[in-house]
Amino acid sequence: MNKPLSQKVSEDQIRQEYLDGYDEELELELDDGLIDHLLEGFSDQESKDTGLDRRVYFKELFRLQGELVKLQDWVVEKGLKIVVIFEGRDAAGKGGAIKRITQRLNPRVCRVAALPAPSIRERSQWYFQRYVSHLPAAGEMVLFDRSWYNRAGVEKVMGFCTDAEVEEFYRSVPEFEKMLVRSGIILIKYWFSITDEQQHLRFSMRIKDPLKQWKLSPMDLESRRLWEAYTRAKEAMLERTHIQEAPWWIVEAVDKKRARLNCINHLLSQVAYSEIEHEAVVLPTRIYHDDYARSPIPSNMYIPSIY
């Protein structure tokens, strides 16, 4: 006979569910930590941990992520369209910030656009064309992990476009962004700023860490050699594309934890949102039938229980 399940849930079960839900953030933090054997060869000054107290960091992160959920509800309820651009040097911490923003959100509402290098066909299109298809509809947020500003940075420095194409980009991008804003899109642009020394440290750690070596492409290594050229390109970009309708916001990103918290806090301040009241969620009573019996599953279909 198919017997109803007990409705009692112990405090230990509830606690374990919460811990499992937050393990992802703990795993990300362990991934970001300075593992002892990876620090061999670094000076004491380079390896000194001057970051936020972990308890303060987690407390604030979870609070801000709760606010992001409220913002998400507001975006859906009001049909808002939000675009957030994340730019910065390689290893500046853009990806880590994006992970913390999206971690508790619905991927159908908040999604990430991280476009690869353009194809031959895309290179023949209007420059902004391949980005337009990723723009949000009503009730959506799109986070661009790098954006159309590739033309002002990597493409310019690496010689993937001509000086004339860069100049045309500078003429076009203010009008393009003004058009987006006029169409109802909320456009927010962040530049993650790190020092020469900090990028050197992070690149060196990636070289030593087999789990992170994949992050270092030949292009990343070349960008390290061309630090000064990237600096000149960044300065020109900020000067010529910092417009009233879509200003640049600088995130001091040498300290990753502070950068994440500050960025999320600022992002929340850019939208006048309020908490949406929801009807109380009630778990419906499961239907039971006396003639129902669960069919057995062959043992060879189960994966090995190694752990």
Image (spheres, rainbow, N blue to C red):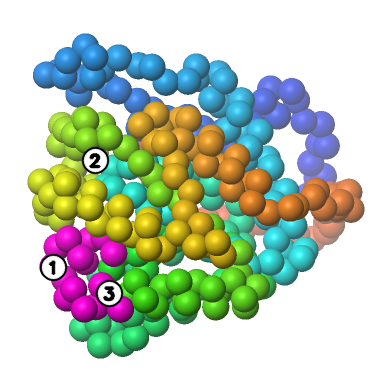
Q: Is residue 202 above or below residue 247?
A: above
C-alpha span from label 3 to label 2: 36 Å
Q: Where is residue 143 in the image (x, y as percent from the top left)?
A: 49, 59
Q: Position of residue 70 (x, y in %)?
A: 72, 48
Magenta stretch bounds: 152-168
Q: Which amino acid does label 2 sit on?
A: Lys
- Which residue is more in the foreground, 141 or 279? 141
Determine whether the residue tagged by mark 3 lies in a helix, strand or loop: helix
Which residue matches tag 1? 159
Magenta stretch: residue 164 in it? yes
Q: Is residue 171 visible?
A: yes
**Is 90 left or right of 292, judged from the image as shown?**
left
Does label 3 or label 2 sit earlier along the sequence? 3
Q: Where is residue 142 in the image (x, y as percent from the top left)?
A: 53, 63
Which residue matches tag 2? 212
The label on residue 120 is none
Residue at position x 67%, y 25% from top? 15
Magenta stretch: residue 239 in it? no
Q: Is disc 2 surrounded by few (<14), some (14 to 19) or many (20+) residues within 10 Å?
A: few
Q: Is residue 82 above or below residue 262?
A: below
C-alpha span from label 1 to label 2: 27 Å
Residue at position x 30%, y 52% from top? 235
Determine whether the residue tagged by mark 1 lies in a helix, strand or loop: loop
Which residue matches tag 3? 167
- Which residue is more in the foreground, 100 or 150? 150
Q: What residue type is labelled 1?
A: Gly
